[in-house]
Amino acid sequence: MSNWLQIVVAAPAHSSIAGPLTYQSELPLPVGSLVRVPLGKREVLGVVWEVLPDSGALLEMQTRHVAGALQGLPPLSATWRKLVQFTASYYQRSLGEVALAALPPQLRDLSNVQLARRLKRPMADTRGEQPGGRSLVLSAQQAAVLAEFDADTRPALLFGATGSGKTEVYLRAAARVLELDPAAQVLVMVPEINLTPQLQSRFEERFAHLGKERVVALHSGLTPAQRLKSWLAAHAGHARLVLGTRMAVFASMPNLRLIVVDEEHDPSYKQQEGARYSARDLAVYRAKIETEDATHAHGPCRVLLGSATPSLESWQATLAGRYQRLIMDERIGTVPSTGEEAAPYSAGPQPEPYSPPKAREPGDAGSLPTVRRVDMNHQPKHCIIAPPLLEAIAQRVARGEQSLIFLNRRGYAPVLACHDCGWKSECPHCSAFRVFHKIDRTLRCHHCGFTERVPRACPSCGNIDIAPVGRGTERLEEHLAELLAGVKRPDGEPVRIARIDADTTRLKGALESQLASVHAGEVDVLVGTQMIAKGHDFRHITLVAAINPDGALFSSDFRAPERLFSLLMQAGGRAGRDARHSGASEMWVQTFHPEHPLFAALKQHDYAGFAAQQLAEREAAGMSPFGFSALVRAEARTQEVAQGFLNAAAAQADALQLTGNGQVTAYPAVPMTIQRVADIERAQMLVESPSRAALQRFLANWQPVLFETRQQAEFKSLIRWAIDVDPIAI
Ligand code: ADP
Ligand code: ZN
Ligand code: ZN
């Protein structure tokens, strides 16, 4: 007798296969089973989504047979399937695309024999289970926050200053979940694992006592074989803790009890192609459904978001009481410890003594660095590093302390120009300039990759005097070397300057070794992009300087100030992490707008004030988190086709009255900021609504219209279109 199954297979977003396909199987297969099925001439991986009741109609149907099940693998859980289903519908993609992208690619090509070999468990560990690494005494704030977290059930946001010891809170929260239930699993997400190799070893060390391979990593830097191995360990329940990037939110973890999202504000949690999901938002959703589905067998699943500069969405959720807010505003070591095991962290809510932070002098916010705004209007013309900043850096070098100079632009100069005829190093394929890289004398387009040798003379008038305009990290490094040439370290050696950015870290292992040399004190002045501004626990940096942060103040993107504020707070957070220096640490900001409220808030380390001001603006304008939006992007050889397609689809939505009494507004299509990339014209349309549900309904109804519009003769040449729900950049 046959079993009829609805099976989900990978389907390109815009193919005719939107939902599951019907197959038959001789053996009964439970929902969630991983199977191989024929599709066209190929055999592909699929997931059993539904078992159909026997009916006469099915007998009549020409259905193909399941080729085989992946043996030895337990089925994917109901929660996992619900998460995938939600993602597909919320982000307007096909179920098959999302489901299969959430599985490790190598699963597709394994025979059952190969799979069986992979599934062999590592040898049982013979050590007794002794919790390791318990030497740290929790700070009073850490202990208080953990107790509060335990006493609540809502999603929690840990608002913890840079250096307040958030990682230790994650470690303890995870440890407790793992101790209480020998099957429990924990997911810890971080923005970019490669940037923080420190973190992975901290987790591995802390949980080494659980036995071999109980802590696994899941991110795109792994080989396909490693990724499969981690995935299988999580799926089988063997891995107790998964440390991963945004993709890890889809890890199959049958006993998931806690999800931690570190640096929850970080833009890299938003996937920027395919299904453009927010892993942070999905983490909150996942914890909710894991809890709802927590039948008899196991307890609820909590989610803990953490940041020194939370996203305004999460912050607003704490103000509205939907999320629990946990605060740590003191840096580790700046408040004398009681010395005793003052803060044992054990089961249940504990009335930990919580003393509110003492009154502070301005600029002494828990020994965060003092912020100095340098008014560039009053500095020598064309100066790159203001003289007082240069002097401060030189003093640090002489004292054997490190400085971090931050400029969010790599390369030597963003433009090369001819002053005679006005030629500029435009990219012939993009509406952008090619960046001058001096090290190999090339002009490189950072959008399409088009690279050429720097011309000897102006390509347009022959003038040999073509010159770089503006400055990137490469030029800044060179400039600093000239300015600091006479400066000596305490050991009498000349100053050592290094640079870390995407160019210096292209080779595998390069970033790790460069970071190691900073940690080892081999570098006095470190120049770099945002790569060095985030997350690192540098111990000897006492000065951080932002050279040219003004650009983002006047961006057309309403999120630009939020991103700038958080980046500067993060960068500043690299200074004075060693309590012995924290009192004297400084964050310098060079700006032509020293009175700007953003910098005023930065000076006070006043995230809450900054957030209040931004939220008021957004509320007045109906923007996130008070309103909801989606962008529809279209690409074609001409703007006319790209914009025409979007406008035609919007007109059709109007004609069909999809916007429901004006609850949803679709604005006219406009070119994207960088309108042409690699000879492709790009346009976008903003769709807004004060109601998330109304926007969702609109998008779901509009999708088929977009598909149909694309079929019209005049839009045949459209290259692609895609919907971005809750976009993070406009
Ligand atoms: P954050 O992530 O909040 O910026 P980290 O978690 O990196 O801060 O902690 C900052 C530093 O303080 C780290 O070097 C960490 O090892 C140390 N630390 C954290 N908690 C404690 C503690 N309870 N006692 C001593 N040192 C601690
Ligand atoms: Zn010229
Ligand atoms: Zn280009």
Image: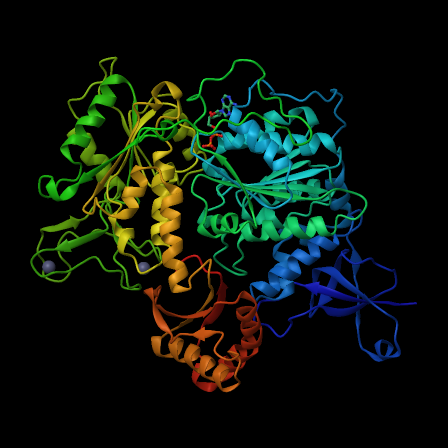
242, 522: nearer the viewer: 242
Q: Residue at x 37, y 36 (%)?
A: 532
Residue 296, quarter of the rendered image: top right
505 vs 63, left or right, is left
Residue 95 position in % (x across, y down): 64, 64
359, 282: nearer the viewer: 359
Residue 209 position in % (x across, y down): 68, 24
* Up/down of 599 relative to 79, above or below: above
Q: Quadrant of ligand 3?
A: bottom left
Q: Residue at x 67, y 31 (%)?
A: 176
Residue 686, quarter of the rendered image: bottom left
* Whether residue 237 can be seen here: yes
Residue 469 position in % (x across, y down): 17, 50
273 vs 434, left or right, is right
* Up/down of 537 relative to 78, above or below: above
Which quadrant would the C terminus be assigned to in this image? bottom left
234 vs 532, left or right, is right
